[in-house]
Image (cartoon, rainbow, N blue to C red):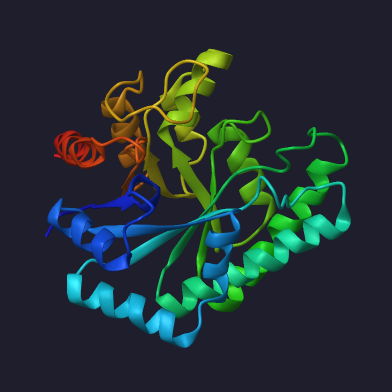
Amino acid sequence: MRAFSLGVYEGDFPGNLDWKEKLTAAREMGFDFFEINIDETRKSLKRLDMNAGEKDYLQLCVKKNGIPLKTMHLDIFRKYSLGSRNRAASEKALYLLEKGVRLASELGIPIIRLSGYDVYYEITADETRPRFEKNIRAAALIAAKYGVMLGLETSENERLDTVEKTVSVVRKSCSAYMGVYLNSGNITVSSGRYNLNIKKDIRTGEGNIIAAHLKDSIPGICRGVRFGTGSVDFNTFIEQSWKAGVRRFVLEGGNEKNDTWEKTLISGRERIINCLR
């Protein structure tokens, strides 16, 4: 039995595939688990209100394919911000977060990756920071109620774009249900922005890191970079993540709209496995 598990991000799969097709493809490519994605689009948000039949069908697909759902990406916090100046908007974000946590609990998903934004379309300010931290503490209590871990992701915006900044917020939650979810692409861009040592930055989060998202990036660009074409040093990132106690990893290929998505994921998995050997 391997000492680690490697999953794959749903966002890399074409949107016209159904659950059965996505899970079958993930299994055939050799991944250990599947990370379900829920973003701010209306179609995706409907997943938060899955009825019993829809949940039963998804779990049946999981069972038949033998590939579990082990992480969820709750990617709603650009539109619905936990730190928004608009109190109604931040309350809506917390409401949607609880729906996501409840769904994860019902589907047997132990970890939710939270996009690390206090605000996105607003400007980070003195007012947004404390509201964000207050709602992170509230989110941790919600997670504790359902027994689901929350991983606050190192993001591309300056509020939480390093491990040191992210773990500072996590520790203020004072909860065993709130941890740091590393993002290799975002951390690499930030290391160039601030001239940071990635190894030292990851070490600041030791004891609070629960998983790592393996994504490529290039200087100044965190999104849409096809895995293997960017500047991320995956050997160094994985080595330091391993030393920090990470054993669960998720691969993001970055090119679900490209006809080569399968090839990218297969070659990306092989590269990551080689790093982990």
In the image, residue 53 sits, relative to residue 241, either above or below, namely below
For residue 88, above or below residue 115: below
Q: How many labels does the image show?
A: 0
* Image quadrant where one finds the N terminus: bottom left
Q: Residue 111 falls in which quadrant of the image?
A: bottom left
Residue drawn at 56 percent across, 36 percent down: 155
Does the image show residue 37? yes
Say whether residue 13 is left or right of residue 48.
Answer: left
Image position, residue 80 (x, y; %): 71, 53
Viewer-nearest residue: 110 or 208: 110
User: Quarter holding the C terminus?
Assistant: top left
Where's residue 174, x and y in %? 65, 58
Q: Position of residue 32 (x, y in %)?
A: 22, 58
Q: Is residue 247 visible?
A: no
Q: Residue 44 at what x, y percent from top left?
A: 53, 60
Q: Which residue lies furthest to the front in this view?
A: 16
The quadrant where residue 59 appears: bottom left
Q: Which residue lies furthest to the bottom in this view?
A: 52
Above or below, 270 against 230 in this view is: below
Left or right position of 67 against 187 = left
Q: Could you say which is closer to the camera, residue 79 or residue 196?
A: 79
Q: Nearer the viewer, residue 30 or 243?
A: 30
Residue at left 35%, top 23%?
A: 232
